[in-house]
Image (cartoon, grey):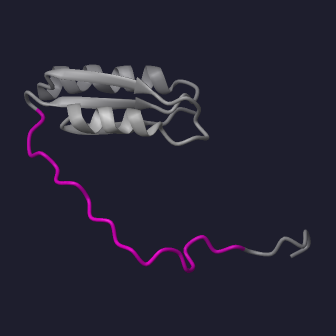
Amino acid sequence: MANGLGFIDPSAGGGKETILLAPRPTDLSGKVVGLLDNTKEQAGIILQTVGEALCERYGVETLIVRRKEHYSKPAAAETIEEMAGQVDVAIAGLGG
């Protein structure tokens, strides 16, 4: 500990609540997929590429793309609620 900061174990402690995963569709054909851009560099390009591949390869019917205000902030509640009401699957895009 030459710098005096010590070691912080991110896995120690934490919440005890277990959050169940949402059910996953077995097929994406005809589904509406939401793509959430986190505003980091290249995130839009990455999501565009993923979206095109999902349409071409897996039959996704519609893409809904939204963008966060800033990568360091959570998505606005309105954005999350809007997407939750419109999409079957959501993907959060992380740029570099």
Figure disc tally? 0
Residue 8: image quadrant is: bottom right
38 magenta-colored: no
* Depth check, front residue: 50 or 16: 16
Residue 77, horizontal then vertical, whole percent: 42, 40
User: Residue pushed farthest front?
Assistant: 78
Which residue sits at x=48%, y=36%?
94
Which residue sits at x=47%, y=36%?
76
The N terminus, quarter of image: bottom right
Which residue sits at x=22%, y=54%?
22
Residue 90, horizontal then vertical, whole percent: 29, 38
Horizontally, is 6 left or right of 78 in the view?
Answer: right
The C terminus, quarter of image: top right
* Depth check, front residue: 71 or 5: 71
Question: Which region of the structure is painted magenta?
Answer: 8-28
Q: State whether residue 56 is above or below residue 17.
A: above
Main structural element of the magenta stretch: helix, strand or loop? loop
* Depth check, front residue: 47 or 16: 16
Residue 73: image quadrant is: top right
Residue 57, horizontal then vertical, whole percent: 16, 25
Residue 85, horizontal then vertical, whole percent: 23, 36
23 magenta-colored: yes
Residue 88: image quadrant is: top left
Q: State whether residue 19 is above or below residue 43.
A: below
Horizontally, is 85 left or right of 4 in the view?
Answer: left
Horizontally, is 65 left or right of 87 in the view?
Answer: right
